Amino acid sequence: MSSKLYKLIPHVHQEFVLVVFLMVPYSVLQMPWDFKSQLLVDNVFLLLMIMWLFLVFTTNQASRQYKGFIALVTGLSLFVAGLYALIVYYVDVVSQLPNEIMPFVYLFFPVWVMLEGILMLFLLGFDSSSKTSILEQKIVVTKPRLGDFFMVAIAAALLVYIGEWVLLLPWYMTVCLVFSLNLIIINQFRE
C-alpha cells in the first residue's frame, strides 16, 4: 500500500465507536416509525452499546477480530452515511441551483466521510500479511478512561446542536459533520 494512501486512513480509537453508536439511533429517529418500532430499535442500540462498553472496560480487546469489528462498524457507518448524504444533498442542491457557493462547500463533509469509510473497509480487504499488520496499527485499542467516553459524547451532542440549529443542516449532513469533526478531535486531541 502506498504511503500516501496509508496516511489518509485515520487512526480509529474505541471512543469513535461510541460516536457511531450515538449517530445510528439519531439517524433512525429521523425516520417515520411508529412508537413501538422506534422504542424497540432504540432499546436494541442501547443494549448493544452497553454490551460493547462492558467489553471495553472489563477485557483486553486487542485481538485481531476485535480490530476487524471496529474497522467494519466504522467503515460501514462512514460509507453509508457519506453516500446517503452525498446523493440526497447533492440532488437537493443541484435542483435548487443556489446563487451562493456555501451549499456546495458543505458537500465536503459527505464526500470525505464516504472516502474515509471506503478506506476503513479497505483495512478488511487484506489477508494476514505484513501489509495487514501495518494497517492494523490504525485501529488503536487501549483501555480508555470513562472521561474519554464522556467527552466524546458531549462533543457529539454539541456538534449535533451546531449542525441542526446553528448551521441549519439537514440531519444526514449533521451526521457527516459529527463523524468528520469527531475523527479529527479524537485523532488530534485524545491524549
Image: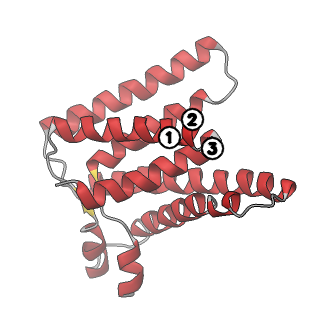
Query: Which residue is outermost to the bottom?
Result: 2
* Residue position for label 3: 169
Expressed as whole percent of the image width and height from the top left, the position of residue 53 reads 25, 34
SS for callout 3: loop
Expressed as whole percent of the image width and height from the top left, the position of residue 30 reads 63, 30
Q: In terms of image quadrants, where is residue 174?
A: top right
Looking at the image, which is closer to me, 188 or 22? 188
* Residue position for label 2: 165
Expressed as whole percent of the image width and height from the top left, the position of residue 57 reads 16, 36
Residue in the image at 52% along x and 59% along y? 113
Give the amino acid type for the residue marked by disc 2 in the picture: Trp
Q: Which mark is residue 162?
A: 1
Q: Are marks 2 and 1 in contact (CB under 8 Å)?
A: yes
What is the CA distance from the residue labelled 3 to the residue labelled 2?
8 Å
Q: Answer with mark 3 or mark 1, whichever residue precedes in sequence.
A: 1
Give the amino acid type for the residue marked by disc 3 in the picture: Leu
Mark 1 neighbour density, 10 Å: few (under 14) some (14–19) many (20 or more)? some
